[in-house]
Amino acid sequence: MEKVSGSSKRAMAREQKLANIAYKIFSGSMMVLTMYGTLLCGSQVYSIYMNRKARQIEAEQQPIDRIKPKTDC
């Protein structure tokens, strides 16, 4: 069995700490990106919902004789 010197152990410990820090930074940035994407998606869904609701309310308030038939056929 090969003996590992003290300085070699310290170097391995430093490398391990650096790897742990890098992993935590990477994981944290992925979490932030996921939350940001969720926020963007949620705001888009909310915007679509509000636009649809506004069009529905506007359509309900229009008198029936003002509704024009489609002539794009």
Image: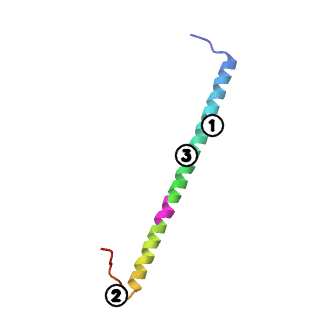
Mark 2 or mark 3: whose residue is earlier in sequence? 3
Quadrant location, the C terminus: bottom left
Which circle marks residue 30 in the picture?
3
12 to 58, vertically: above or below: above
Q: Secondary structure at mark 1?
A: helix
Q: CA distance from mark 2 to mark 3?
A: 52 Å
Mark 3 or mark 1: whose residue is earlier in sequence? 1
Secondary structure mostly taken by the magenta-highlighted segment of the chain: helix
Q: Is residue 10 left or right of residue 40?
A: right
73 to 32, vertically: above or below: below
Q: Position of residue 59 (x, y in %)?
A: 39, 81
In this view, which residue lies farthest toward the left? Answer: 73
Q: How many residues crowd mark 3 within 10 Å: few (<14), some (14–19), many (20+)?
A: few
State the extent of the magenta-drawn residues as a range: 41-45
Which circle marks residue 21 in the picture?
1
Q: Which amino acid lies under the numbered mark 1 shown in the image of this protein?
A: Ile
Q: Which amino acid lies under the numbered mark 3 shown in the image of this protein?
A: Met
Q: Residue at x 57, y 50 (%)?
A: 32
Q: Residue at x 59, y 11 (%)?
A: 2
The answer to which quarter of the image holds residue 24 is top right
44 to 12, vertically: above or below: below
- Eye-nearest disc, 3 or 1: 3
Q: Is residue 63 left or right of residue 37?
A: left
Q: How many residues crowd mark 2 within 10 Å: few (<14), some (14–19), many (20+)?
A: few
